[in-house]
Amino acid sequence: MSTTFCPTCMKDVVVRVEERRESVPVRGEAVEVPARVAVCPACGEDVWLDEFEDETLARAYAEYRLRHHLLQPPEMTRIRTRWGLGQRAFSLLLGWGEITLHRYESGSLQDAAHDAQLRMAERAENIRILLDSNGDRLTPRQRAAVERPLFEAERAEGVRACEDEELERLLTRDSTGAYSGDVPVSLAKVREMIVFFCEAPNVFVTKLAKLMFYADFLHCKVSTISITGLAYAHLPHGPVPEHYERLRADVLENALVRIEERLGDDWAGEVLIAERAPNLDVFSAGELQVLGCVRVELGSLSSKTVSDRSHSETAYTCTAMGERIPYAAARELSLTMPRQS
Ligand SMILES: [Zn+2]
């Protein structure tokens, strides 16, 4: 033990360390914890030692969190790192100040409202909501870092379908300006497009996303606007509509399609099968031509072939993981409409 100044003896002394239980006031509550205390051997008075005081306070906070069912700092770190973000970025995503989470993870006592928010941030669907409202506080790179684990988690959690209005609002929020193909989101067109493509055999969930992408982007290429108004994101297996898991849940819930598990030697996948004929009245003649073209050109190809092709599109190569894909890239789409005879 190093020497410390004793204000009673007015000199540096080598303190003695005692173990006792101390009562520490935390938010007006007396919390009793074991504490190490430095004692002056000459006068027998307690001597202030920063190191011991910090240790005792940390123990008192930990005990207080336990009593009030608050997260301990390592649990907060675990929640944050699950979503691939640093302290500052995750703090901003939560709508907090830049250093709030840093303080909490370093041992400051969190307030109950922040604690509740952090617990909710364990669930993918809540991270999705936070991204929708605070995503613009993150850099594209940070957004991309979240998207990957989020996409996986949404699959694992089995995101539930939501009401039409809520779904439309969610889709519209992510689909603005350059990312919507200049038309408002049409849930009716989204659903009928899915049914249309799922009439064909062997439409795996991953392939459907690509067919939708090609339909919207091809229509944009020939007419400058998309069909559905959906935004697409650059994800590991190619372009995927934003909130794709929720769309999948929606068409299942509304019994537009059913799912069949397919097992291969070394793979497993979900095939979507239409439960009724599509209502083509929601589409214009030009949209129907594009849908027909995509189904003829890509409908019979394997998921892998379609996925590989989508990876080579400018729309994909000009964007980074997790980023939304601008419809301007539709001009360079490899797919073209057959010449009218
Ligand atoms: Zn002393």
Image (tube, rainbow, N blue to C red):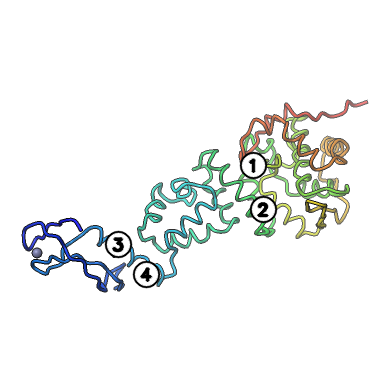
Task: Identify the residue position indicated by label 2 in the image.
Answer: 167
Q: 147 or 166, which lies in front?
A: 147
Residue 175 is tagged as 1
Say if 250 sits above or below 225 in the image.
below
Residue type beneath disc 2 = Leu
Image point 61% across, 46% down: which residue?
148
Few, some or many residues within 10 Å of mark 3 (<14, 14–19, 20+) = some
CA distance separating discs 2 and 1 = 12 Å
* Between discs 4 and 1, the one toward the N terminus: 4
Residue type beneath disc 4 = Glu
* Between discs 2 and 3, the one toward the N terminus: 3
**Residue 94 placed where, x, y %?**
48, 52
* Between discs 3 and 1, the one toward the N terminus: 3
Task: Identify the residue position indicated by label 3 in the image.
Answer: 55
Residue 63 is tagged as 4
Residue type beneath disc 1 = Ser
* Between discs 2 and 4, the one toward the N terminus: 4
Verify CB contact (< 8 Å) between mark 2 and mark 4.
no
* Quarter of the image that includes the C terminus: top right
